[in-house]
Image: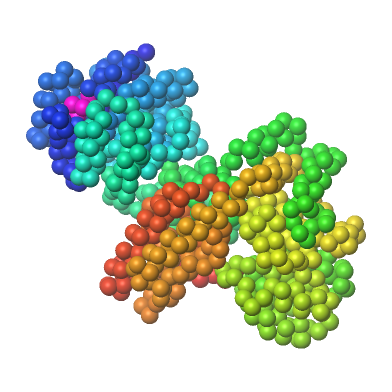
Amino acid sequence: MKTLLITQARFGSTRLPGKVMKEILGKTLLQIQLERLAKCKRVFKILVATTDQAADEKISNLTRDLGFSVYRGSESDVLDRFYQAAKPDAPDWVVRVTSDCPLLDPALVDEVINYAVVHDADYCSNSLVEHFPDGQDVEVFKFAALERAWNETQLPSDREHVTPYIRKNSSYFNVNKFKSINYPSPADYSRIRMTVDEPRDFELVKTLIENQGSDKTWKEYVQYMVENDLTAFNADITRNEGYFKSLKEDKVKKRYQKSEEMLSRALKTVPLGSQTFSKSKTQLPFGVSPYFATKAEGAYMYDVDGNQYIDFVNSLASITLGYNDPDVTNAVREQLEQGTIFSLANELEFIVAEKIVKMVPCAEAVRFGKNGSDATAGAVRIARAHTKKDHVLVCGYHGWQDWYIGSTGRNLGVPQATRDLTHSFSYNDINSLTKLFETYKDQVAAVVLEPVNVFPPKDNFLEKVKEITHQNNAILVFDETITGFRFANGGAQEFFNVIPDLACFGKGLANGYPISALAGRADLMKLMEEVFFSFTFGGELLSLAAANATLDKLEKTSVISSINKVGSFLMDSLRQLIRKYEFDNIFSVEGYPVWSFFIIKDTEWCTSWEIKTLFLQEMFKRGIYIIGTHNMSYAHTVDHVETLMKAYEDFFKLMKKVIAEKQIKNHIEGEVLVPLFKLR
């Protein structure tokens, strides 16, 4: 097996010209790297690939003087340069590194090579998940994969950076041209930076070499940086900035090319192109947005174009533990071996019900559905059966079924008679509720509300709602589809210590698996024996297994407190940025640490929808997936939030420019969002 290692080097650099020829203790960075890489045991040859520009003659001469091979080729088509450099040796495997990583660990290179060979991967890297320090990046791939990329790719950004085409079209992103695998880091060191792109980087590497020498392992350098408080010295510099610059030059649309192609195809058979309104083209500005995802892990989501995002939407708040949580996944995998549904009930139905009864204050009995809409519709039906009354008073969003959606602007297809039975009141306005009870005296079956959403309850609002509801012999229903198992293990009712008669749960109940629950007083739930509430898949076992594992983890670990801690850091940090840029008149942060809202207001010269379009455009560019809320999960860390804050700060800097020009449309690269109907 022949493995060729190629390091890319050139004299030109926008941010630090001639960096690879800069010296530390009498040796250039390129020499330091080559001497370290010479210790690799799994490569038969090391080659430097530089350009055919006159300035790179120095690199060519130095490389030969040091006894290493050199190839000179195109400056702009780096993929071609790389392919032509490798082709004469006809290697089985190729290792790609860059010369701006002088402290690259040779033992780590060998480890990644071995991992690629053992797994017979077309492509293996330790940076598919960026947990190794920046400057320890290694890519290993089959020469056949390199040749295929060289033949097929056309995008400038894919030809300027060698491997993006392979990565984007690999199995890691659910595309099957190339089998790919990530070599995992023992921990998340992504905040550590020991590459050289800017003057500060060089000063840090110089400090490391002068104090530790040039022969230490990557872990020893990390330890020294931690012990000497050097980790923040250059941590604010953007990783892979050169590739992001190339993406801009592709034109923004190219970044989401596959998403837009898939959307065009989907619209032929799927109205809106998505099963979920909030994931559709109505909510994501065309031209600057991804539309289709391929996979998610922890706090990260990946789209079909291979773009990685820190996800603060978390599948519309249904992910509380993090994507693909191992405990939940293992529970589902074990149940899959036993079966997903039977011709009889299964014990998981009452085991999960017992756990909900134990955790949720109002719960004395439980029935399961699939969506939050199932649970809210069931609650209304029970309330009507119990009270023998028909009218329902609502506050918040409660699903797609006729009884509720008929009261909104999205009421097309709902009979007028049904619309006439549901009436909305305003949160924190107890008089608006009192007036409805007066208007529909002795006709109200239930009050259904989200116990909290954007703004916190004021002046004992929830207690007053409960009191007035019971005074009018109606049933109080808390729609805890989002707040349940997020604000506290027992939901918002536990958090605010206001206990409803019935409560509806979904989303975080099973960390993203399709299940909802209606829970409440035993006498009310007893009506389920007469009220028809029945689903073929109500007892589907994969979702119940997921719920069982999720509830176990909520009880046994500090999930909620961790989410609160990181979410508090987010809200505090964002408020500081808003104050720093004097944007209090346009932006604010509301809600709670576990579920907070970035509020955008209209200005005299542009609408909030125009600002939101620009906001989404800039966030998506920076690898942040967000649509206006911060739906926190246990997988989110302070590091993720700091990355988010960098993106917010970039957006605020752009907004300063926009305000000065008062020409926001000059900066919007896609279609502007339009208002539809307000849920909250």
Q: Residue at x 64, y 52 (%)?
A: 508
Along the viewing direction, whichever of 324 and 107 lies nearer the viewer: 107
**Residue 153 location in percent, x, y?**
34, 36
Q: Residue at x 35, y 39 (%)?
A: 227
Which corner quadrant of the image does residue 128 belong to?
top left
Camera-nearest residue between 111 and 604: 111
Q: Is residue 361 visible?
A: yes
Please identify the residue farthest to the right as the structure is shown. 530
Q: Is residue 197 magenta?
A: no
Q: Main secondary structure of the magenta part?
A: helix
On the image, the x and y values in percent for residue 504 come to: 73, 60
- Residue at the spot x=19%, y=29% of the render? 30
Above-or-below relation of 447 to 228? below
Q: How many marks?
A: 0
In this picture, residue 120 sits left or right of residue 33: right
* Quarter of the image that includes the N terminus: top left
Q: Specify the segment rendered in magenta.
A: 30-34
Q: Quadrant of residue 390?
A: bottom right
> Height in image: 658 above or below 368?
below
Relative side of 127 to 242, left or right: right
Task: State the image coordinates of residue 331 (x, y, percent, origin top left).
Answer: 68, 36
Camera-nearest residue between 66 and 273: 66
